[in-house]
Amino acid sequence: MHLLKSDAQTDRRGFFKKSLALIFGGVAALLPVAAAIRALTDPLRRKTAGGGAVRITSLDALLQDGVPRKFPVFASRTDAWNKFVNVPVGAVYLRRMSDGKVEALNVVCPHAGCFVDYSASRSEFVCPCHNSSFKLGGQIANPASPSPRALDSLPVEIRPDGSVWVTFQNFQAGRADKVPVA
Ligand code: FES
């Protein structure tokens, strides 16, 4: 009887040892596979080079009348495999005030991502998709606008050579806070 109990304990210990060996062996076998998948997909997960300052135009090209003018934005993008030079990444409205200050707004409507138009007759931005409207400074004009936030303002820098640079960034649509798109 004593011998039988001892045999059963030995069998249980053996079973646990084999189970643990199988589990750790399986994990060890999966690690290289996971590393290979990670290496293959890394360029897809890697962020493109964005969010830096981009030259948009020269200061001379902007009348000091406070009227928004639309400019395309081109930038270089890289991933692990490719470098794309001067690809279109969006557009901005630039506005130069009488005091010389320049403001930049991303043209993308924060509601669902359509490009807003500038209406000269209304002196405001209007979204053609669901009719959000925005003041010249980007604030929501009509409280009934479905946009959850104002147009996204962007930092502007005037360089000594008279060129206008904007730190371009797209932001997630459909939310009240500005969350950069990776
Ligand atoms: Fe502009 Fe809906 S996308 S109002």
Image (tube, rainbow, N blue to C red):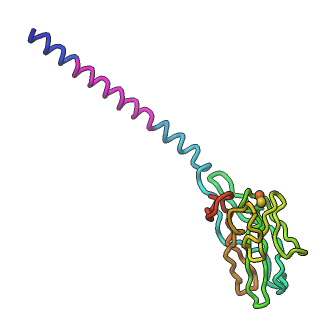
Q: Is residue 151 above or below residue 165?
A: above
Q: Which residue is outermost to the right? A: 121
Q: Main secondary structure of the magenta part?
A: helix
Residue drawn at point x = 78 percent, y = 83 percent: 96
Look at the picture and state if 3 lies above or below 55.
above
| In front of the other: 67 or 166 | 67
* Residue 30 colored in magenta in the image: yes
Q: Residue at x 73, y 70 (%)?
A: 140
Question: Residue 101, image x and y in percent?
Answer: 73, 86
Image point (22%, 16%), residue name:
11
Q: Is residue 1 left or right of residue 171?
A: left
Quadrant of the image containing the C terminus: bottom right
Q: Quadrant of residue 166?
A: bottom right
Q: Most extreme residue toward the left, as rendered?
A: 2
Tell how many labels. Answer: 0
- Viewer-closest of 93 and 21: 93
In the image as oriented, which residue stretches furthest toward the top?
Answer: 1
Q: Quadrant of ligand 1?
A: bottom right
**Residue that lies at the very extreme toward the bottom in this rendered image:** 99
Q: Residue 110: where, in percent of width, then height?
A: 71, 62
- Does the stretch in magenta take in 48? no
Residue 83's quadrant in the figure? bottom right
Residue at image coords 74%, 67% = 143
Vertical comparison of 149 with 30: above or below? below
Where's residue 43, x and y in %? 60, 50
Specify start and end residues of the magenta stretch as a single range.
Answer: 12-31
Place residue 117 in its image quadrant: bottom right
Position of 59 with respect to 48 (left or right) is right
- Where residue 94 appears, as percent x and y from the top left, is 78, 76
